[in-house]
Image (cartoon, rainbow, N blue to C red):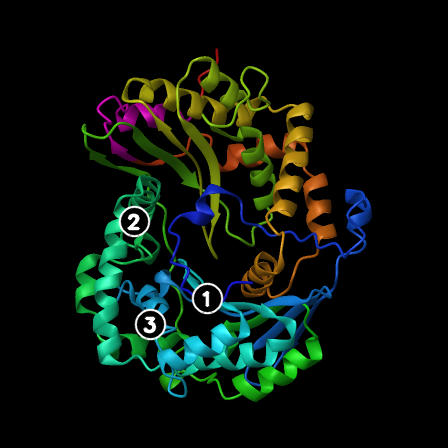
Amino acid sequence: MAASVCRAGSIVGQALLQARSPVLLSLRRGQASLSYAQSLLVVPETRLTTLENGLRIASEESGHSTCTVGVWIGCGSRYETERNNGAGFFLEHMAFKGTKKHPQSALEKEVESMGAHLSAYTSREHTAFYMKTLSKDLPKAVELLSEVVQSSSLSESDLERQRGVVLRELEEVEGSLQDVCLDLLHATAYQGTPLGHSVLGPSQNARTLNREDLVEFVNNHYKAPRMVLAAAGGVNHSELVDLAKQHFSTVSFEYEEDAVPVLSPCRFTGSEIRMRDDGMPLAHIAIAVEGASVTSPDIVPLMVANAITGSYDVTFGGGKNLSSRLARLAVEENLCQSFQAFHSSYSDTGLLGIYFVTDRHYIDDMMHLAQNQWMNLCTTVTESDVARAKNVLKATLVGQLNGTTPICEDIGRQILDYGRRIPLAEWDARINAVTPTMVRDICSKYIYDKCPAVSAVGPIEQLPDYNRMRSAMYWLRF
């Protein structure tokens, strides 16, 4: 395994392109021929322990020679203000530039000598620092992670060097029109609220954030009850708990003046934002309504609905025999380069929508088909639609968790979101319980006659007027 020290940049909008409710399928060696039903019975147990300071330790032991271990923290750009928006992302860049015990060169040598891979990411509600390494090096990995989380040096010289890196990354993200479009969708849908903030923050903040801002963010939010030490692969839970006691028991659980930060509700606003540039070859457009929160019981029927809508890319292959009705129509009429149904869920809200890329001449037609697909979900879903979508959903959810790193991420995120790891069998039962009537009712609840949020980038002159798009959110029947 190649040795490296790297920082996984904040992938803005990554969660937007697929339902993120996690499911695990981790088969031991020799069990690859098991049927799906049999595999539900052999999933390793996820064990959970809580320290006195509130920090939670969760692990799944699969007997591999490698493991992934990391710290997941319940804070992200949603916890920032307009003044310090981007602080979490800046900290992500600073995380591996040295600790009080290990300067950057020593930290890199430690990781390299283990043949390990050290990474991090920031999202709107979560921050993570994690390492993939050989199972025998788990103690050293936990020690280094504890230093990164608790005692990063955050030197002024490193901060100034990273300022230029952050600004260049902001420029690179502006070249990813998908990220730009989905960031704009959040900005208009949650305007005036913290969820409207970009994870990366504005370039002005990247130029002005200082060491005191970063230290204040860490002191305010990096608290033990909001942290999960998660591990998957060749790990022993008892050993992991002992390591956590050794390295994380001193993490504070107290807030200054006992003022525990409380998230303000993020209201959804039906609205639009357009960035017209006729010099671009293709238009990038997203339309969404307010979806379900991550803990809502409606989330599984909405996942099934999104599986019915499906996705398409011109590089896929297939044509008139594609199972998704929207994909078939898009292929037959050559209306788009790609589209994707998405549902991005947060602690108290969500975005349910469709993102597509199309030529300027087909914007109106593609928007009509997308909204028509939503109306079909509210009124005409059939048994065969739901049966196919269930199979697609199960395969997708299982396929997303192939390896110790996605499993570890799944554990950390679920403990933060639910306080427990939901077993695969439970997700399977929830999916099986979905009926066509349930899909129609839930989609009507969230989609029918609702004001959408729309974002569009590129040559978008032909994008319909907002009032026209709003009027397509219901059907008049005589």
Q: Provide residue 438's location: percent of width, then percent of height.
A: 63, 34
Please tell me how crowded label 3 is: few (under 14), some (14-19), or many (20+) other residues with Cα within 10 Å.
many
Apparent side of residue 173 relative to residue 307 in the rendered image (left or right):
left
In the drawing, what numbered circle is on residue 309?
none
Residue 246 versus residue 18: which sits nearer the camera?
A: 246
Q: Which image quarter: residue 271? A: top left
Most extreme residue toward the top is: 478
Q: Amino acid at mark 1?
A: Ser
Apparent side of residue 207 relative to residue 17 in the rendered image (left or right):
left
Which numbered disc flags the more N-terminal residue, 2 or 3? Answer: 3
Residue 47 versus residue 192: which sits nearer the camera?
A: 47
Q: Amino acid at mark 3?
A: Met
Q: What residue does disc 2 label?
A: 173
Name above or below for residue 438 compared with residue 333.
Answer: below
In the drawing, what numbered circle is on residue 94?
3
Q: CA distance from mark 3 to mark 1?
A: 16 Å
Regarding mark 2 in the picture, which secondary structure is present there?
Answer: helix
Which numbered disc flags the more N-terminal residue, 3 or 1? Answer: 1
**Dot in front, 3 or 1:** 1
Identify the residue at horizontal 23%, vertical 51% (top origin).
171
Which numbered disc flags the more N-terminal residue, 2 or 1? Answer: 1
Asked if marks 3 and 1 touch (Cβ < 8 Å), the reply is no
Q: Amino acid at mark 2?
A: Val
Asked if marks 2 and 3 touch (Cβ < 8 Å), the reply is no
Apparent side of residue 207 relative to residue 385 in the rendered image (left or right):
left
Q: CA distance from mark 2 to mark 3?
A: 19 Å
Apparent side of residue 238 relative to residue 324 in the rendered image (left or right):
right
Which residues are drawn in magenta? Answer: 456-474
Please tell me how crowded label 2 is: few (under 14), some (14-19), or many (20+) other residues with Cα within 10 Å.
some
Identify the residue at horizontal 74%, vertical 51% (top origin).
425
Q: Is residue 473 visible?
A: yes
- Check if residue 117 falls in the magenta segment: no
